[in-house]
């Protein structure tokens, strides 16, 4: 399932697609276009809604209290978190102790400042804790939650769309030359084209898997 399909399937949960609403719910330092932070520094600026995925439009910008020009309409700013980025899938247990049960998790590695561009995903035994407020989604079969450290940054009302292997190396349009190198290292290439509805400048064409 993709985000646009989850949007149609769960109309009563549309607020969870709103990243500004989620950031406010989690009490992060954030605000929409037309506002600015009280303290100058680096902040992540990204679309409030993005069902096309792949981090399209997300950037790190230096913002100051007296300048609102760096955040375009339809976008918001939020404090930047440090730590490992995790992508974890959970299912809800309806028993005497209702809770989200972790199913699988990967940790991401970036090699550039481009938000969307991951170099590698590795299966992880670490499962960040899901805040209790996500129990509102207990009627959703599976949720995929993205964290930086222990901070929730996105909630998807579906499983991860990526292949389930111990190592997943995205291959981008400009890195096709690396396929042979990875195959010599024992990886297998799998087609998986993604350009975020044409908004991604450098499409992902597939994965090396192992």
Image: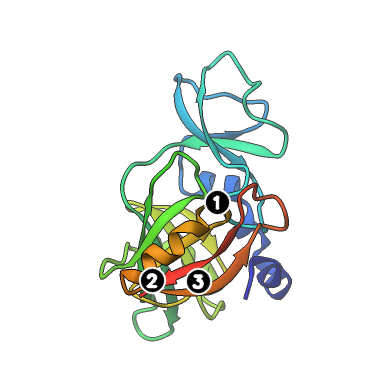
Quarter assignment of residue 11: bottom right
First in sequence: mark 1 vs mark 2: 1
Q: Is residue 183 visible?
A: yes
* Total labels drawn: 3
Q: Which residue in the structure is indicated by mark 3?
A: 162
Q: Position of residue 112 (x, y in %)?
A: 43, 42
For mark 1, give the secondary structure. Answer: helix
Q: Is residue 130 visible?
A: no
- Specify the farthest residue to the left: 125
What is the spatial separation of the Cα atoms under label 3 and label 1, in whole angstroms?
20 Å
Q: Position of residue 152 (x, y in %)?
A: 43, 54
194 relative position to 29: left or right: right
| Colour mode of the rendering | rainbow
Q: Nearer the viewer, mark 3 or mark 2?
A: 2
Q: Is residue 9 above or below residue 146?
A: below
Neighbours of disc 1 within 10 Å: few (<14), some (14-19), many (20+): few
Q: Position of residue 21 (x, y in %)?
A: 59, 48
For mark 3, give the secondary structure. Answer: loop
Q: Quadrant of the C terminus?
A: bottom left
Residue closer to the observer: 15 or 126: 126
Point 62% across, 24% down: residue: 70
Q: Which residue in the structure is indicated by mark 1?
A: 174
């Amino acid at each position: 399932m993709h985000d646009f399909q989850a949007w149609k399937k769960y109309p009563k949960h549309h607020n969870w697609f709103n990243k500004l609403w989620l950031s406010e719910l989690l009490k992060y330092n954030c605000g929409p276009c037309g506002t600015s932070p009280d303290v100058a520094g680096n902040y992540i600026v990204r679309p409030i809604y993005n069902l096309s995925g792949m981090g399209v439009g997300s950037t790190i910008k230096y913002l100051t209290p007296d300048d609102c020009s760096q955040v375009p309409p339809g976008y918001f700013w939020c404090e930047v978190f440090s730590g490992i980025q995790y992508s974890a899938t959970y299912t809800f247990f309806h028993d005497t102790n209702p809770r989200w049960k972790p199913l699988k998790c990967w940790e991401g590695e970036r090699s550039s400042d481009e938000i969307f561009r991951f170099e590698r995903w590795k299966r992880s035994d670490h499962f960040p804790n899901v805040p209790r407020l996500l129990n509102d989604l207990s009627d959703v079969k599976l949720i995929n939650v993205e964290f930086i450290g222990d901070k929730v940054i996105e909630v998807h009302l579906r499983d991860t769309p990526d292949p389930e292997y111990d190592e997943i190396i995205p291959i981008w349009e400009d890195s096709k030359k690396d396929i042979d190198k990875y195959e010599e290292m024992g990886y297998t290439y799998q087609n998986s084209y993604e350009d975020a509805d044409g908004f991604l400048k450098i499409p992902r064409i597939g994965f090396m898997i192992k």
